[in-house]
Amino acid sequence: MPATAIPRHVLIPLIVACALFMEQVDSTVISTSLPAIAASLHDDPVALKLALTSYLLSLAVFIPASGWAADRFGARTVFRSAIVIFTLGSILCGLSTSLLDFVLYRIIQGMGGAMMVPVGRLVILRSVPKSELVQALAWLTIPALLGPVMGPPLGGFITTYFDWRLIFFINVPIGVLGIVLATRFIENVREEDVPPLDLHGLVLSGIGLSGLVFGLAVMGQKLVPYWAAAGITAVGIVALIFYVRHARHTPRAVLDLTLLRIPTFRAGVVGGSLFRIGVGAMPFALPLMLQLTFGLSPFASGLLTFASSAGALVMKTTAAPILRRFGFWRVLVFNSVLSAGFIAANALFTPQTPHVAIVGVLLMGGFFRSLEFTAINAISYADVSQHEMSRATSFVSVAQQVSISLGVALAGMVLEAMRSIRHETVLELADFTPAFLIVAGVSALSVFSFMRLPRDAGAELSGQKPKGSTLPDPRGEVHPGS
């Protein structure tokens, strides 16, 4: 291992941070640039939802295999290969000439991202002594917090004053740096006894999740006829039914459904997924509305929408005291409805709305949504045992990506329906009103899942029943609009 003046608990997280920053920025800059990309590819802006859903679905499909691959082939090998795949996908995205190309290359990017971020965290857990782990993870959270804040204005600036393709090409030097540093400073740690991968389950869950979400996403699009979209959706549902049967009789299923027997975990997955559907629609629908109906440039749009992530960043220092004061039950129940209200408030924006008012709503909305995510992330693992933790993490990661994908698909379907009712091809401001209200309504449905929790759920985590436990790091989930 080459000598370096930088301590390992700082160096290794910073190397992993190269990958995490690249993935976080990439996932946020594209939202602001969707209208410009659609114009360049001579396609419908609403159809560009496929670029978002395909990437997120690729993450959901391949994340469950990331831990097994790292154990089998070595963390450094998989981490480095993931950066290569992600960077290659970025280059191909920048060279796209059609929507079909772009969606395919986003899937390749997602394959890299699915391995890159989870295995990167695993590298830290296996390479840094436990006494230095907290400090190491603190370094890792910096790009996770800054990426979503920088992404929208950066993407808007590049798209407005240069070319949207540059968004993907800037990943190349970051990727090369990450590959070089990983090769020099990260050990190729692997497990000696690795159980077989649940390949049957991986295939069934992959077909099921991708079929369901992709079928809904292409519903009403010109890419495929209605019957084909319905068929894809039906295949996805059938595959998921078969996966449930498979998981019941498989001890080490790739997605362990037995974890849903834990009330807090079930609430975190079910309620959290409903809540994320509304939040997932925001980075797709809001930039479209601001650019296509308000007439804002991508840069001006990005300067407004980054307020949500800024609000989330502000919240990070206040989450623990709020949860300690009010408890998980009150925060999850009341804040889910409040957060859904801020999503619905986007339906009130007009071109005449002062920008300072829009920023204020987005800032407060980002604050409360991030508080909800903090509570959801913590309560999900409150009663999960250590030997179940890796399976629980994979399950939650997949649920997060699928629910965000469903949010994008749902918003796109509503916009398509409103446009079809008017027999028009151009989106109008009135089309966005029901879209925001419907996705906000779905988010609000999460309250029924949270209300079923015991009133003292997560009390030890929040500090209301101090038994030596501390609140988990709330920054485990950061994504556009969080």
Image: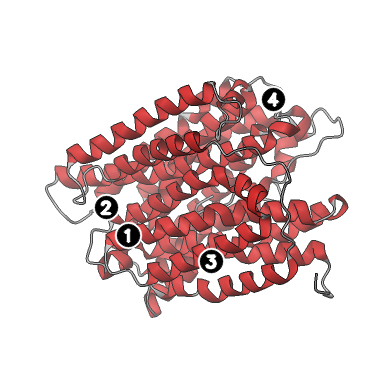
x, y percent for residue 89: 44, 65
Earlier sequence position, callout 3 versus callout 2: 3
Dots 2, 1 in contact, CB < 8 A = yes
Q: Secondary structure at mark 3?
A: helix
Depth check, mark 1 against mark 3: the one in front is: 3
Q: What is the count of numbered marks?
A: 4
Depth check, mark 3 against mark 2: the one in front is: 3
Earlier sequence position, callout 4 versus callout 1: 1
Judge by depth and name the residue closer to the eye, 137 or 186: 186
Residue drawn at (36%, 52%) of the image: 285
Residue linked to disc 4: 457
x, y percent for residue 252: 60, 30
Residue linked to disc 1: 351
Q: Residues within 10 Å of mark 2 (few under 14, many from 20)?
A: some
Depth check, mark 3 against mark 4: the one in front is: 3
**Inter-mark Cα distance, 4 to 1:** 44 Å
